[in-house]
Image (spheres, rainbow, N blue to C red):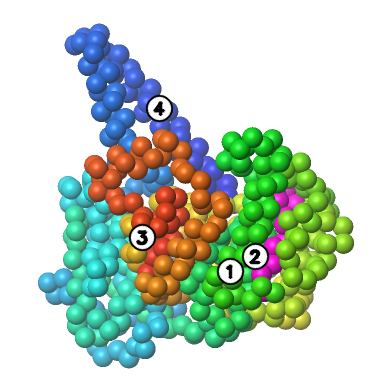
Amino acid sequence: MSESASRKQALLKRHRRNKRISLLVGLLLLVCIGVMVAWWLPLLLAVVGWVAHEAWFADHLFYSPSDDYQYQFESPDEQPPVSLENGRLVLGQALELSGDETLVLALRLKSGWLGRFIDPCIELPGGDRQVFERGVDGLRYLNLTGQTQALIEGRLVLRGRFCRVLGAPVLSVFRQPDVCRQRIMVIAPHADDAELAAFGLYSQATQPWIVTLTAGEIEAGHYQQMGLSKPDAARLKGRLRAWDSIAVPRWAGVAQENCVQLGYFCLQLAAMKAEPDRAVASREADLSDIRLFRQFNPFPLPADADGLPTWNNLVADLRALLLKARPEVIVLPHPVLDPHPDHICAQQAVLEALQGLAWQPDTLLGYANHLHDNDRWPMGDSGASVALPPCFDPTYTLRPYCLSLSAQRQCDKAMSLGMMHDLQPRMPFKRRVRRLIQRVLAARAVSPWGENEFFRKAIRRHELFWVIKHK
C-alpha cells in the first residue's frame, strides 16, 4: 500500500478508536445516571446524544478546526498588496487581470458560537459563499476565481456568516493557459471520476479524450437485491459502468472514438502493480478476463490479445493510447491529495507509460475526488464555489489551476452524473435519517440535483486542479 493510502487508513483507524472510547465512556456515565437518578433518564439522554452526534459530530474530520492550513504555493505570478476595509477587499496597486486567472486569498477565520453548530462561511458577491469547518479558528484559503471584475472595481465584499475575518489577507495570483484549446486526455480510475473532477473542463475542450481504467464492478449489493448472485451482480454492474464510461461523455460532445474503457478490476490495481506479470482477478465478479468490459471500445488495444488483468498490460494499453491521442494535457488523480488506492495507481501507471515515450505532454493537471482529512470537502452546498482543501504538509509545493463553470454547465454536469448507474441507488436508511437531522438542526441543504453526496460535492461554480507539470 502506498504512503498516501496508508495515511488515510491510519486516520480512519484512529477516528474509529476514539469513537469507541467515547462510546464506552458515555455508556458508563449513562449507567451511573440510571442507578443514581432515574432508570428512564439514560434512555432519554441516549436518544438526545445520538441525535446530537448525527447533527454535529458525524463528519469524518481528521484534524482540529483550529489547525492552520499549511500551503506552500509554487511560484505565484503576483502577490499584490490587499487590505480589508469594512469587509471590502481593496487592491493596494493597479493590477491587470484578464479574468482567467486563479485567485487565492489567505486569511484567518474565527468561528462565532453559532458557527459551532451551523457551518460558518464567507459570503461573496453574486450569491456565492464558501463554507468552512464548524468551529473554524485558523488560516484558510478563499478561492476568488471568477470574482476578478468585482475585485478590480472595488466591489468584492467578504461577509462572514457565523465567523469573522482576522488579520491581514494575502492575495496570490496564478496566471494560467487556456488548456481547453489543447488536446486533453482525462484519466478516470472509475466511471464517473472524469465527470466528477473535470466535466466542465473536458466539455469545453476542442479535442478531449476520456480513458477509464477499471470497470468498477464491486459492491454490487443493489443488483443482488434484484435476485442476482454476487458474481452475476458484479458482472452486471461492471458492464453498466463500462457503458457509462463510453456513453456519458457523449453528452458533453466527446467523440465516441475518443472514449475508452480498459476494463481492469476495481481495487486490484495495487496488487497488479506489486507483481506486474501476475493476472489479478476480480474480487467479486469471478472473472480473470478483462475483455467482457472492453466490448464497447472503438478500436483494439494491446491487452485485447490475452485479456489478462496485469500491470504490464495496463501500461501497454496506456502507451498505445498516449501515442494515438498525443495529448498536450493529461488530467489525472493527484499523487498526494487523493488517497484512494486505485487513484494513486492510476497516476503511477500513466507516469510509467510516459517513461521513454516519444510523445510527452506539456501539462499534467491533478485532481482529488477523495481527501485524507475531510470526507465532506468541498464543504457547503451545490452551486457554491470551492475553497481550497485542507493541507498540512508545507514541504510539498502546490500550484492551483481553477476553472469557473456557468450555471448551464453545472446543470449539464449534474445530468451527466445522473446518468451514472453507480450514483442512482438510494442512500442507506441511516444516512437518510442523518441528512434529515442535519437539515433541521445544522441548516444543511440537500442538493436539488440528486440524493448521492457527490451531487453536493461536484456541482459547483469551480473545478479545482493542481499543476503537476507544465512546460
Q: CA distance from mark 1 to mark 2?
A: 7 Å
Q: Nearer the viewer, mark 4 or mark 3?
A: 3
Quarter occupied by residue 15:
top left
249 displayed left or right of 309: left
At label 3, the amino acid type is Ser
Quarter occupied by residue 358:
bottom right
Q: Which residue is disc 1 drawn over?
A: 249
Q: Which residue is disc 4 drawn over?
A: 21
Residue at x 67%, y 44% (from the top left corner): 234
- Per the image, label 2 sits on a secondary structure element best described as helix
Q: Give the mark nearest the N terminus, 2 or 3.
A: 2
The disc at residue 382 is: 3
The disc at residue 246 is: 2
The boundaries of the magenta stretch are 258-273
Q: Give the mark nearest the N terminus, 4 or 3.
A: 4
Q: Does residue 121 appear anywhere in the picture?
A: yes
Residue at x 18%, y 66% (from the top left corner): 159
